[in-house]
Amino acid sequence: MKNVHVNSVKLVIPLFVLLTITGLFYSCKRAAEKTQEKLIEKSIGDNADVDIDDEKIVIKTDEGTFTTDATKHEWPNEIPNDVPEFKEGNIVVVNTQDMVDGKNWVVIFEDVTQKAIENYKKELEDNNFEISFTTTAGTGTHFAAEKGKLAVMLMGDEKGASISVNIQK
């Protein structure tokens, strides 16, 4: 009978310690997030509301809402269908700005080839986008395309790419 009690205590104490440490970790993590939120709000101004949740940050102001989400790894469904989806590489993070005068998405990719960037530019042209400028330096490419109230900008090289889609209201 004594062995059962000793064995139970041997299991309960480590479990208690583990649960206590886990609770403290999450409590400290949440406290750190709240501190970061307050610092960001103070740096932006009194009218900012910041919410940090692990890999997602939402900032709301009078001008609109900015969201960055490192857990989102797919092309945003809200981007108008006129804009072809960039299907090469891997999405690392998606940023969204919902402003009074329009909406903007920035999709950041890794593992993108120069050929994929060239193909995307051609795909935009095939979808009646007008290329307004192209700059190439070394292995890097930067171009902008427009169609009505839509604007697409791509900056990329052999390592990755950033695609910005903007729609004016």
Image: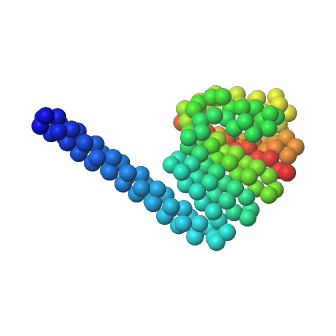
Could you tell me residue 4's position as x and y percent? Answer: 17, 34
Q: Nearer the viewer, residue 1 or 143?
A: 1
Is residue 128 left or right of 28 when viewed as pictured?
Answer: right
Can residue 95 be seen by looking at this rendering?
yes
In the rendered view, would you say 51 is above or below 104? below
Instruction: Give residue 82's quadrant in the image.
Output: top right
* Residue beneath the point at 76% across and 29% down: 123
Q: Nearer the viewer, residue 153 or 139?
A: 153
Is residue 36 left or right of 152 when viewed as pictured?
Answer: left
Could you tell me residue 59's position as x and y percent? Answer: 63, 58
In the rendered view, would you say 63 is above or below 10? below
Could you tell me residue 89's position as x and y percent? Answer: 59, 30
* Residue beneath the point at 53% across and 47% down: 55
Is residue 127 left or right of 88 when viewed as pictured?
Answer: right
* Residue beneath the point at 69% across and 56% down: 65
Can residue 142 be seen by looking at this rendering?
no
Q: Nearer the viewer, residue 72 or 144?
A: 72
Is residue 26 left or right of 97 when viewed as pictured?
Answer: left
Which image quarter holds the N terminus?
top left
* Residue beneath the point at 85% across and 51% down: 169
| Residue extending farthest right | 148
